Every structure is written in C-alpha cells, then in structure tokens.
Image (spheres, rainbow, N blue to C red):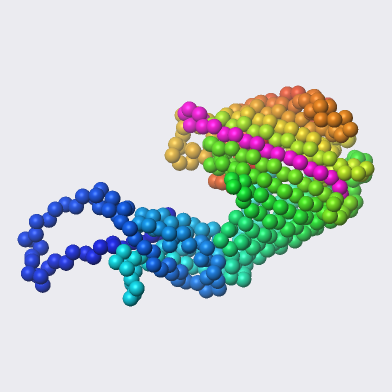
C-alpha cells in the first residue's frame, strides 16, 4: 500500500505532576482494541485539504483528477483506502518515482474538529532516463536500449526512443504518448519506426519503414484501440536458394491500413493464468486510405482458465483468422497467417505448417488452432513457497490447420477445407514462469496428422515467448 502515516484524531489525555495527579495513583484499564477500531471506522470525518509536495515541472491540473475521490471519503478507513487508490493513480501516470501519503488533523483558522489534511509527498522522475534490458519474443530474444523523456510538457506526456537488436529482428523507433487528463486509459500515441526482420522459414528478409497513430479507450469492460498505419515495405531473399515463389514477392510495396482491436481480459496473469478468460478480436482494412496493398483481415483469440483440485489448472484456447484480398491482386506473403512451432501447434517446426514451395513456407489466408492444457505443480512440490512455485508440469493437446481459400466457394466450403488434413500433437513437459514478462517451455512432443511438406520437431522441443496457444 506504500507508506501511509495517520495521526490520532483525538487529543492525548493529559496527566502528570502539574495536574496534581501521579501516574501511580491512576487505576489504568487495558483498552479494548476492537471497540476502538469500530469507532475509527464509523467516525465521520471531512477531508478539508489535499496537498501535493515536491512538484517541479508537473502541472497541478492533471493531478486534480487523480486525487478528487479523496475529498469524498466519509470516515478514517475510507480516507486511507481512497488515499491509497489515489497514490496508485499517481504512480500509474509514470511521472513520479516515489509517492508517500501523510494523513493529519486539519490546521488553520478554518479547521473543523473532525477535519483532515491529506498530503502526497512526491519525487518526480528525472527529465531524461535511460534503460537497458533484454526482451523475450515468440521463440526469439533481443537486447533493448531505451531513452525516455517522461512528463516532457508537464501533463504525463512521454517521448521515447528505443533501439532493439535481436536474433531475428532489429528495430529502432521514436514514439510520443499523451494520456487524457483524468482518464489514463484513454490515450493517444504516434510512432515512427524502422524494423528489419529475418524469416528463415520463408527465406525472406523484410524491412519496414513506417508511421502509425493509435487511440486507446475503454468501453464498459472492454478495451479498444483504433490505429492507422502507413508503411513502406521492402522484401528480399534471405538466401540464394530461395524459391521462385518467394523471389516473386520480392520488391517494394506501400500499405496504408485502418485497424481496430477489442480486448476483454479477466485473467489473473497474462503469462501463466490460474483463472479468468481472454477474448481478443482484431480487424484490419488496407487499401482504402492509399497504398497498393488491399485486403481485409480478421482474427481472434479466446482463452479460458479454470482452477481445479490440488492447485492444478485446466486451460483451453482457440485461435482463428481469415485474410480476404480486395481486387485482383493476390495477398502478400508478409500479410498472411503462419502456424506451427513451440508457441502454437507444438511438435512442428516454427511456422512450418501449410502451403510451401521448395521448402519455403508461404503462409495461408485462413487458419484455426486450438489447445487443451493441464498445468499441475511439480511432483512432491520441491521448493514450495519459493523458487519451486515458478515451475509447473504441463500436459497438452494441440490441433490446427492453415490453408488458402477460394472465396467464391462460399462459407460451407471454407469450413470444410479447414477441417481437412488437421495437424495435431500431444505431449508433456515443464513450464517456467519468468515473472509477468515471459515463460519458457521444455516439452516432449508427439506430432500427428503430418501432411506432405510439413516440417516436424518430434521429441524434445524448447519454446520461449509471451503468447502461447
């Protein structure tokens, strides 16, 4: 809860020789703590003043929204709770490195007998901060260097420069973030970036140079993001042995797209949840705001988690998506879906399911993937209550399919095609949770339903990432 200091609302009883009473002559009675606690909880108080000490470049008007609820507190316990909530909101702004709360009796000529003053003692972040860390993606790692200018204009704005060098991707970008005063969940950001990635499963190299703007906002229990992105894409072959289908895709293209994402997330943890559900829906429309890439793309993700007996968890997940070309031009290899690997359908090599040409995987225009998982504590629970709780035993059953569709055949034919030649796998392994950042898996996999052209990884398979089927 942080540090919350509170002084007694009642004056201390006076005693001593000056009053003609000796302490030894008093018949002291042990106070009863429970009735006193009840009095404190029910005693009406009024928060008369709220002070914020330690402000430098921060404008006071943006903080007014975050502390307004403190004035509505009716008793001491309510004051402490609302002060704690206000402290969390102030920290969430990302402009303070420390926030302490002091609750005291009101002072001054207008002080009421039951009046309180609440003081937030803050320490602002430096005008410029740097960071160095490592990041785990879907079966890849990267080193990240960052330079941040927090609270640049005094109202929780943030300017960030970031450089990332990874095993498959190198990027750098400049971003500006601006929240709406009083509604931090409603925020606007603009990003300028360059990303160079290598995709060995397709013998492809891609360089993106682009700009994007995002507006995020909540509606009831859902979180929404509206995004426009304009990107200049350059595709090239990663190896001389690249297939003709990949060489055909090489060259330059422009994509201008509008997208919308909706998320409902009630899970207790995004990495290894024990309860809750996730629903994520994405739509992207490209071509109507310019560029030569024209398509409509839809995909979704569903996850359900249920705690069972003996601290075990049953988890079920379902992914799916469809890509529809607009006009006569076919879809690009960099816009299609990919499936397979330790983070999706286990037992197959990374993105090695579906259409391929001479060993290069070209992706598909429609896919689905489902998983059923049982997570249990380690046998005999070594290290219980400490490091051992980061490990879980993992039993899984995965299935999925990815293909291209003839959109003139109708929905029933599409579903029939996705139901053909289903790849599936099962196995068991160990999962290590790395805080709420990422997780590692070491599984023994048995792939089934293997089709011609698929590349399997039977036996022991290692996976690292933040998004798993």
Instruction: Find residue 4 and report its image quarter.
Output: bottom left
Q: Nearer the viewer, residue 71 or 349?
A: 71
Q: Name the quadrant of the C terminus.
A: top right
The magenta segment: 293-312
Taking the spot 16% from the left edge, 52% from the top edge, the residue there is: 30
With 81 as the anchor, is 34 left or right in this view? left
Magenta stretch, main secondary structure, is: strand
Taking the spot 55% from the left edge, 71% from the top edge, the residue there is: 59
x, y percentage for residue 432? 57, 39
x, y percentage for residue 451? 80, 26
x, y percentage for residue 203? 84, 43
Instruction: Find residue 430 and report its image quarter.
Output: top right
Q: Name the quadrant of the N terminus.
A: bottom left
Count the labels in the image. 0
Residue 402 in sight from this viewpoint? yes
Q: Inspect the magenta stretch and tell me whether residue 306 lies in it.
A: yes
Taking the spot 82% from the left edge, 49% from the top edge, the residue there is: 286
Q: Is residue 339 above or below residue 220?
A: above
Q: Is residue 351 above or below residue 422?
A: below
Q: Is residue 283 above or below residue 118?
A: above
Q: Nearer the viewer, residue 209 or 205?
A: 209
Residue 463 in sight from this viewpoint? no
With 64 as the anchor, is 166 left or right in this view? right
Q: Nearer the viewer, residue 196 or 150?
A: 150
x, y percentage for residue 162? 68, 60
Taking the spot 76% from the left edge, 41% from the top edge, the residue there is: 298
Q: Is residue 144 above or below residue 321?
A: below
Find the residue positioned furthest to the bottom: 109
């Amino acid at each position: 809860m942080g540090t919350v200091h509170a002084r007694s609302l009642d004056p201390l009883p006076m005693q001593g020789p000056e009053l003609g009473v000796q302490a030894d002559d008093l018949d002291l009675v042990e106070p009863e703590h429970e009735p006193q606690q009840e009095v404190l909880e029910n005693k009406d108080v009024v928060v008369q003043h709220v002070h914020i000490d330690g402000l430098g470049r921060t404008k006071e008007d943006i903080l007014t929204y975050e502390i307004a609820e403190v004035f509505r507190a009716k008793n001491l316990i309510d004051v402490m709770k609302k002060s704690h909530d206000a402290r969390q909101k102030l920290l969430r702004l990302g402009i303070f490195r420390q926030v302490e709360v002091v609750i005291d009796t009101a002072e001054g000529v207008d002080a009421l007998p039951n009046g309180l003053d609440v003081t937030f003692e803050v320490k602002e972040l430096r005008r410029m901060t740097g960071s160095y860390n490592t990041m785990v993606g879907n079966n890849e790692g990267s080193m990240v260097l960052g330079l941040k200018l927090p609270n640049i204009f005094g109202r929780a704005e943030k300017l960030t420069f970031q450089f990332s060098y990874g095993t498959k991707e190198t990027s750098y970008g400049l971003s500006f973030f601006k929240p709406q005063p009083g509604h931090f969940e409603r925020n606007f950001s603009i990003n300028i970036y360059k990303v160079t990635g290598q995709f060995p499963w397709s013998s492809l190299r891609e360089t993106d140079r682009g700009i994007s703007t995002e507006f995020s906002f909540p509606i009831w229990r859902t979180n929404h993001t509206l995004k426009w992105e304009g990107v200049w894409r350059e595709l090239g072959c990663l190896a001389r042995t690249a297939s003709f289908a990949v060489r055909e895709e090489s060259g330059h293209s422009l994509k201008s797209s509008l997208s919308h994402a909706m998320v409902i997330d009630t899970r207790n943890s995004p990495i290894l949840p024990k309860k809750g559900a996730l629903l994520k829906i994405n739509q992207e429309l490209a071509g109507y705001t310019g560029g030569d890439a024209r398509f409509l793309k839809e995909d979704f993700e569903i996850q359900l988690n249920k705690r069972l007996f003996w601290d075990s968890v049953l988890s079920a997940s379902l992914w799916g998506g469809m890509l529809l070309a607009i006009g006569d031009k076919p879809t690009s290899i960099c816009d299609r879906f990919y499936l397979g690997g330790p983070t999706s359908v286990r037992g197959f090599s990374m993105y090695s399911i579906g259409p391929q040409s001479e060993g290069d995987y070209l992706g598909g225009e429609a896919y689905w993937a489902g998983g059923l998982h049982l997570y249990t504590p380690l046998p005999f629970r070594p290290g219980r209550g400490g490091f051992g709780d980061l490990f879980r035993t993992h039993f899984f059953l995965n299935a999925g399919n990815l293909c291209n569709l003839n959109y003139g055949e109708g929905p029933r034919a599409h579903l029939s095609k996705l139901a053909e030649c289903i790849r599936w796998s099962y196995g068991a392994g160990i999962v290590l949770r790395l805080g709420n950042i990422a997780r590692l898996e070491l599984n023994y996999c048995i792939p089934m339903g293997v089709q011609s052209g698929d590349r399997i990884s039977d036996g022991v398979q290692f996976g690292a990432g933040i998004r798993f089927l």
